[in-house]
Amino acid sequence: MLTRSEIVCAWALLFFVSLLAGCGGAGERGVRPADARVALLDELAAELNPDISGLESFFVFWEAGDYVNAEGALLQYFREKEIPEEAMPTPLPVDQSILIRGLDAWRGKFAFQGREGRAAEPDGPIDWEYKGPDASNEWSWFLHRHAFFREILLLYQVKGHPEFAERIRDYLTDWFWAYPPPDRFSFSASWRALEVARRYVDAWLPVYEELRGTEAFGAEAEMAVIAGAARHANYLRNHHHFGGNHLITEMMALASIAVVWPEFSDSEEWLSYAVERSLEEMDRQVYPDGAHKELANHYQWIAGSSFQRLYSLLIAAGAAEAAEQMRPRMEKIWDYYAWVTRPNGTGPLNNDSDLEPNADQLLSLAEFYDREDWLYIASNGEEGERPSGTPSRVFPWAGHVVLRTDWGSEGDWVFFDCGPFGTDHQQRDQLHLSASLGGRNFLVDSGRYVYRDDPWAEYFRGPRAHNVPTFDRFDRIVPDPEAREPQKDLLDQSGELRIATGSIPLRDSVTGIWSGEHSRTVALGEGFVWIVDQVDLSRPDEITFRWHFDPELVLESVGSEWEIKADELGVGRWTTASSVHFEVEEIAGRERGEIQGWYSPEYNERVPNSVLEYRSAPTSIARVAWLLVSEERDLGEAEIFFEGDEAILRFGGEGADERSYSIVPQ
Amino acid sequence: MVTRLLGLLLFVGGLLHLLVGIAGSWGKIGLVYWQTFLTMVILPPVLWSLAGLLLLLLAVPVARFLSRGLDRVDTE
């Protein structure tokens, strides 16, 4: 006899198992039927709307069992149809490196995120289960996105050899029959929803547009792309992600398929569902200040681009009401993207980001939205109209402060993060700042490097890869993933300097009490950044500050200062003043023991960079001032010190203007 | 008696921890730390206190249940 608790446990287990049963792998592998073209015609007849004008003859032939004429009627109808430009990805440039990648893919060798692997023999089919040289899921996802189809396609367009189109045909039909859609949510590389979205709109659609009607591509591949539209759309409609930037891309793809293929019985429903979910997600995923809630410049671009493609598509499809609803938020998204841009045109590496070319990406958006101010930012003031107001700006929901002395390629720039953790792709970078002076990058964020569970990923995600202090006994508290209201008083522009402030609570790891605090004040002036840190702890602890410098810079210790050089020329100075003594060590490219001194501009790529590590003896209170001065400006001798409660910065010396500033640390 | 004592300890201990947690972090909770503060500092001692209170209120039936179980143990 079962007891009551055993019955409850059994029910709970059953419920959990039933939940798990609802999702899983790709399902069974399919086999290409003997008469593949007839099977495709049957599949299409079941999915297409028989009331569509122009498809009548197809249905008549098909019902009569005249498959040859049915196929002819169907292909003729679709070959004559225009595919809206807005549904297509940005064309690939005719670039030698892309052509080489296309040739490699034609021979069965693929390179994704800098890692190369052979998934097929030169004449054989692809082993779709191959996961690359590191057996990584990421590599496998990229293989199933089929982006290499476009690279082979470019090769075909340039060279004109039919064997390139034939290879795409073989890869595509092989995959089509091997991977029928599962009827449940799948985490497999073949039917993970993001791969479904990317594969169809970024690979199959452009291939179809270019190769339809060619003998090399053939009728089977052509019909597989058309039938594939319904397969992909039905899957995206019913098994998309629950949220995040993936969902936006998936809904953009669903809307694209619906607009390109209105002939399917469910097309209208696909479009209205995609629009409805996208508008909901826009409210859910984007702060009123325009920042995407994952708070990573890279995903601002990814999510923004998906919204942008959907927005352009809605305009093209005449869905004026939905497009109108999207417009104000779209401008906010790109406005944020414009304002965080560095003087050299790249974006910050906050959270999981690569080095995005924000300025280049903005150019077409400035034209699309007729925003002269974005054009000014993107062109470094050479075109467009200067944005109104001061060039510094706070994004109170994102908790990001951008300090800037002026626009232009030689401006001074600081990106200071005192916001929430982010809803995904988080890094423990609260109170981190990146800084450029005179257009040159000095202080940097280390980037994202890889998505893995190993010491490398832990380093890049953690505070040790950022310009923030860590402690022996105290832990930095991770903020909430999302802000519920905007923060106030993050930026002060009332004085001569632009000043940003933020603080983070610290937790005593033994008692669990939040009995410490680190507050940071960042001041930007013409040619210098001055940072004042205050740490208050309920009991003495060792504090370690780290400062990560751009990989192009070389540091040299000169007395109590550090001279910063680029190409053997002095470009900056780094000075410290502190209420406690610090032992300083320069670290670059350390792989053994505690990883330190690495910078990643792109996924899977890392280069060594210099990091200054300042370690104190146990202390309860520490006040530290840091000064970074550009040598390319003639600012004279700089001196920083504390006087009572104030931190003082003084410039002077021969031939230089005497100036002094003060900050009272919070 | 033991059950009541345990309940009282949990209840008072939870309350004390809550008070110390709030006092220790006074003035340090920024706008983007509230959710974390609630889940890390407030919720655990509140749950301890509630568990203690429940144990205090149900001390008699809990003690009876435990003693019945002990009676059944064959000590030989």
Image (cartoon, rainbow, N blue to C red):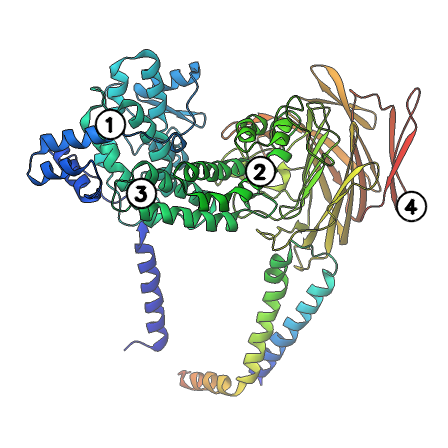
Q: Residues within 10 Å of mark 3 (few under 14, many from 20)?
A: many
Read off the residue under disc 4.
A644
Residue A595 percent coordinates (x, y) = 59, 34
* Labels 1 and 3 share a subunit: yes
Callout 1–callout 3 Cβ contact below 8 Å: no
Q: Quadrant of residue A142?
A: top left
Q: CA distance from mark 2 to mark 3?
A: 39 Å
Specify the label residue B45 is tagged with: none
* Labels 4 and 2 share a subunit: yes
Can residue A340 be seen at all in this image of the molecule? no
Q: CA distance from mark 4 to mark 3?
A: 67 Å
Q: Quadrant of residue A437?
A: top right
Specify the label residue A79 is tagged with: 1
Q: Secondary structure at mark 1?
A: helix
Read off the residue under disc 2.
A459
First in sequence: mark 2 vs mark 3: 3
Specify the label residue A233 is tagged with: 3
Q: Quadrant of the N terminus of chain A?
A: bottom left
First in sequence: mark 1 vs mark 3: 1
First in sequence: mark 4 vs mark 2: 2
Going by the numbered disc 3, the residue's amino acid type is Ala
First in sequence: mark 2 vs mark 1: 1
Going by the numbered disc 1, the residue's amino acid type is Arg
